[in-house]
Amino acid sequence: MALTTNKAVLDWIDEQVALTKPDKVVWIDGSEAQLEELRKEGMATGEMIKLNEEILPGCYYHRSAPNDVARVEDRTFICCKIGRGCRPHQQLDGPEGNVCKAHSAV
């Protein structure tokens, strides 16, 4: 189901589908229901892991593949809106709160 009636956008999407031949096209509507479905799918495939709800409520660890690991530590960042999720890493100011340099996987 398309979320727009803009012919230029729909034509562009049709062109991209013809070029890439995806199995399916998913329109992201921003709803909580769709977000929860995507999270469930990610956890079922092993791409996402729900983190400790007491320590990090509503947080997930996501990787592009279950065997994916950070390859360059100094280019790995944990971004959060509150500083407590950043400890004990070096804390840097970020536009949406804190951007913290991660020295190890969460």
Image: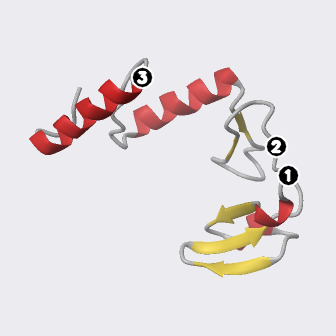
* Residue marked by disc 3: 22
Q: Residue 48, position in %: x, y? A: 68, 34
Front tag of 1 and 2: 2
For the residue marked with disc 1, what is the amino acid?
Ala
Residues under labels 1 and 2: Cα distance? 9 Å
Task: Give the structural element (helix, strand or loop) at label 2.
Answer: loop
Count of marks placed on residues: 3
Side of 51 where 28 appears, left or right: left
Q: Residue at x 73, y 63 (%)?
A: 77
* Residue marked by disc 2: 69
Residues under labels 2 and 3: Cα distance? 26 Å
For the residue marked with disc 3, what is the amino acid?
Pro
Q: Residue 97, position in %: x, y? A: 60, 74
* Residue marked by disc 1: 105
Find out whether the residues at labels 1 and 2 contact each other: C-beta distance under 8 Å. Answer: yes
Q: Is residue 8 above or below residue 88?
A: above
Extreme residue in the top direction: 23
User: Quick one: quadrant of the N terminus?
Assistant: top left
Q: Residue at x 78, y 38 (%)?
A: 68
Side of 23 where 72 appears, left or right: right
Front tag of 2 and 3: 3
If you read the primary sequence from the N terminus, does the residue marked by circle 1 or circle 2 appear first?
Answer: 2
Residues under labels 1 and 3: Cα distance? 32 Å
Task: Give the structural element (helix, strand or loop) at label 1.
Answer: loop
Front tag of 1 and 3: 3
